[in-house]
Image (spheres, rainbow, N blue to C red):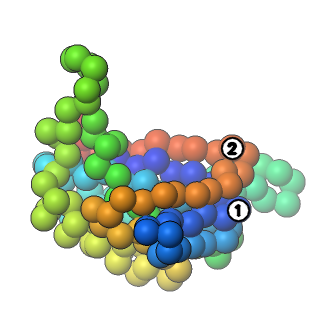
Amino acid sequence: MRAVIQRVSEASVVVSNDIVGAIAEGLLVLIGIAGSDAEKDADYLAEKIVHLRIFEDEIGKMNLSLLDKCGAMLVVSQFTLYGDATRGRRPSFTAAARPELANVLYEYFVNRVRSYGVQVETGIFQAMMKVRLVNEGPVTILLESPNVS
């Protein structure tokens, strides 16, 4: 699994001109799922992300986690994180999980994050979405579960 984590002061997802998910301070997480991923990959990323110390403490040092800040998370499924453009000009997405598996692991990841007591909002799986955000810092972190080669 791959994740792009962005520290935000606000973020939302719009589908067909309707806001389907929105948060104030917290993290926007774009999550990509590979065909070889399993629940252990989602467990790893959920635990890592909620404890990632990327929020500033009282002296301005990135020393606080999402849990410390009582922030929220907006999770958006993003199969294009597995786009491979090394050959040609059009990316190949063969490494991305098929939608059936991806949706199961996406929902599993969301539920794992919620199990930490985090408010989680989501987009709509496989929908055409518009993601809006205000990236604070800017802070953007890329993470992969150990399964990724």
Mark 2 surroundings: few (<14), some (14-19) or many (≥20) residues within 10 A: few
Front-lying residue, 145 or 82: 82
Task: Kindly indicate whether the residue at mark 1 contacts the one at mark 2 (C-beta within 8 angstroms).
Answer: no
Circle 2 sits in a helix, a strand or a loop, which is it? strand
**Residue tagged 1:** 9
Image quarter hosting the C terminus = top left
Quarter of the image holding residue 10?
bottom right
Q: Residues within 10 Å of mark 1 (few under 14, many from 20)?
A: some
Question: Residue 60: horizontal and vertical position, in percent?
Answer: 83, 51
Residue 31: quadrant of the picture: bottom left
Q: Residue at x 42, y 45 (%)?
A: 143
* In this picture, residue 140 sits left or right of residue 129: right
Residue 95, given in percent of the width and then of the height, sits at: 17, 40
Q: Position of residue 82 (x, y in %)?
A: 27, 40
Sequence-first disc among 2 and 1: 1
Residue at the far front in the pictured view: 17
On the image, the x and y values in percent for residue 121 come to: 48, 75
